Image (spheres, rainbow, N blue to C red):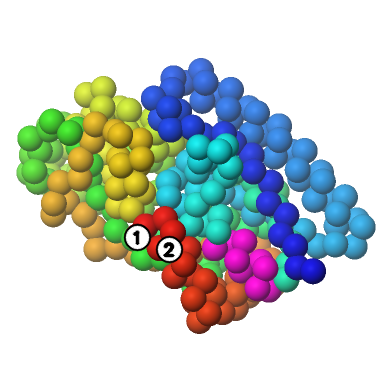
């Protein structure tokens, strides 16, 4: 019987979007401890003759990965990976580490693959990322406070914009900052970035459009998405950084093709975005 092992690691409640740095550090410390324990469990399974792939992901990137009201780790990425693993018959452990920690785990060889709304872009490919076929196309958009009068890039002159470290949204903001005369402040996670705008420290932030729309709706955030301040868009991809894990990437691509053909993919997307 095909079986998927998914370890759900970080509790990210909707109220967590307004949490302070202290609680964030505590959550990250707990996540790191649990991740280490699960890596040990995976190694034991491997010693027993069962290959268990370690897949790293973000903690809160709604609707792609997040914790729901039942304290379950869910999302588009979570469901797509589970469906592909079932289709291809492989086992895995999903480690919810946060974006920076997930990337670092892949780079250090502590995880085999990454699924975290990672945009396929040449800069990453040049630095060693090996991507799957794209599994979702997303744009990035500027987001402002609900009562803001900012309606275009020209209105950002002399002001500050919040971005999330190492993301396509950060790249989008940096590509425009000199032309439109705004500065950029970098954050490690999306909730803290949103909070910076809500508190008025930054006049805007930049986020993937579907994530931002879901976060505003589900979290009842005092933010809005102005029209005409989005990028052209690019696909998300599953990623490895070591060629020895090519088997995992090949299975992901094969499984993705199958779940698109049998309708499972559309069911997952509609579940979260319809």
Query: Which is the main secondary structure of the residues drawn in magenta?
Result: helix
Magenta stretch: give its range: 80-88
Q: Where is residue 36 shown, x and y percent of the image?
A: 74, 38
Residue 227 has which mark? Answer: none
> Which quadrant of the figure has residue 202?
top left
Q: Secondary structure at mark 2?
A: helix
Which of the two residues, 85 or 51, is positioned nearer the viewer here?
85
Q: Few, some or many C-alpha atoms within 10 Å of disc 1 (few <14, some 14-19, many ≥20)? A: few
Task: Please state if 45 lies on the left or on the right of 7 as rendered.
Answer: right
Look at mark 1 in the image and give the residue it sits on: 274
Name the spot of residue 10 as percent of width and height, x first. 59, 36
Q: Are marks 2 and 1 in contact (CB under 8 Å)?
A: yes
Q: Earlier in the sequence, mark 2 or mark 1?
A: 2
Q: Quadrant of the N terminus?
A: bottom right
User: Are there few (<14), some (14-19), or many (20+) residues within 10 Å of tag 2?
Assistant: some
Residue for badge 2? 269
The C terminus, quarter of image: bottom left
Residue drawn at point x = 25 percent, y = 50 percent: 141
| Residue 65 % position (x, y) | 50, 48
């Amino acid at each position: 019987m095909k079986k998927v092992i998914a370890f759900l690691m970080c509790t990210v409640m909707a109220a967590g979007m307004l949490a302070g740095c202290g609680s964030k550090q505590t959550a990250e410390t707990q996540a790191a401890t649990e991740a280490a324990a699960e890596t040990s469990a995976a190694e034991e399974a491997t010693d027993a003759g069962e290959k268990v792939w370690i897949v790293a992901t973000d903690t809160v990137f709604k609707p792609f990965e997040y914790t729901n009201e039942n304290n379950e780790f869910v999302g588009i990425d979570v469901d797509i990976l589970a469906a592909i693993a079932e289709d291809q018959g492989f086992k895995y452990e999903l480690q919810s580490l946060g974006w920076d920690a997930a990337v670092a785990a892949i780079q250090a060889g502590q995880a085999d693959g990454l699924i975290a709304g990672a945009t396929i872009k040449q800069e990453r490919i040049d630095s060693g990322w090996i991507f799957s076929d794209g599994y979702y196309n997303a744009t990035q958009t500027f987001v402002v406070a609900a009562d803001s009068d900012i309606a275009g890039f020209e209105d950002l002159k002399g002001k500050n914009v919040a971005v999330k470290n190492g993301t396509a949204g950060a790249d989008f903001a940096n590509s425009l900052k000199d032309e439109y005369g705004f500065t950029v402040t970098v954050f490690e996670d999306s909730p803290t970035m949103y909070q910076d705008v809500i508190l008025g420290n930054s006049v805007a932030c930049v986020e993937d459009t579907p994530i931002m729309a879901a976060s505003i709706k589900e979290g009842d955030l005092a933010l809005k998405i102005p029209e005409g301040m989005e990028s052209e868009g690019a696909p998300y991809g599953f990623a490895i950084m070591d060629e020895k894990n090519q088997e995992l990437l090949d299975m992901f691509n094969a499984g993705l093709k199958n779940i698109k053909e049998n309708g499972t993919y559309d069911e997952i997307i509609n579940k979260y975005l319809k």
